[in-house]
Image: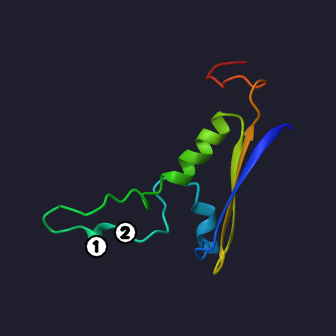
Amino acid sequence: AEDITIKVSDQGGGIPRSGLPRIWTYLYTTARSPLPDVDPDGYTATTVLAGYGCGLPLSRLYARYFGGDLQLFSMQGYGTDAYLHLSRLGNEEEPLPGQK
């Protein structure tokens, strides 16, 4: 096989079609802000790491760095399918800047 593909699916309502062109943009998020849950004294029971708009762009960047790709297909009102494609080990070189 040339590569490996991992599929992750959810039924979390999907991404609105109007937001799809921006999902790969840093700092764009569809998640609600965690700030209303913060205690006025600055203490929280848990640390929220979701909704900052870095996960999808960074994940795709890492996938491409390792010779693969990340694709998302979303159906608003139902859920999202994410496909992570990675090249099999052994026949790809690390893509370094300035390398011909």
Image position of 53 with respect to 17: above or below: above
Assess disc 2: are there few (<14), some (14-19) or many (≥20) residues with their C-alpha within 10 Å of its C-alpha.
few
Front one among 21 and 75 = 75
Q: Position of residue 1 (x, y in %)?
A: 86, 38
Instruction: Look at the numbered disc 2 and give the secondary structure of its residue.
Output: loop
Color theme of the render = rainbow
Q: Farthest residue to the bottom: give it.
A: 77
Q: Residue at x 59, y 39 (%)?
A: 62
Image quadrant in which you'd find residue 8: bottom right
Image quadrant in which you'd find residue 77: bottom right
Q: Residue at x 66, y 39 (%)?
A: 64
Image position of 66 with respect to 18: above or below: above
Badge 2 amino acid: Ser
Image quadrant in which you'd find residue 46: bottom left
In the rendered structure, are the residues bearing label 2 and label 1 in contact, judged by CB atoms less than 8 Å apart? yes
Q: Position of residue 24 (x, y in %)?
A: 58, 54
Image quadrant occupied by the C terminus: top right
Assess disc 1: are there few (<14), some (14-19) or many (≥20) residues with their C-alpha within 10 Å of its C-alpha.
few
Q: Residue at x 58, y 61 (%)?
A: 22
Q: Position of residue 6 (x, y in %)?
A: 71, 51
Q: Farthest residue to the left: give it.
A: 41
Which residue is the site of mark 2?
A: 33
Image position of 13 with respect to 45: above or below: below
Badge 1 amino acid: Pro
Which residue is the site of mark 1?
A: 36
Give the left or right position of residue 97, taking residue 43 as reference.
Answer: right
Q: Residue at x 49, y 60 (%)?
A: 28
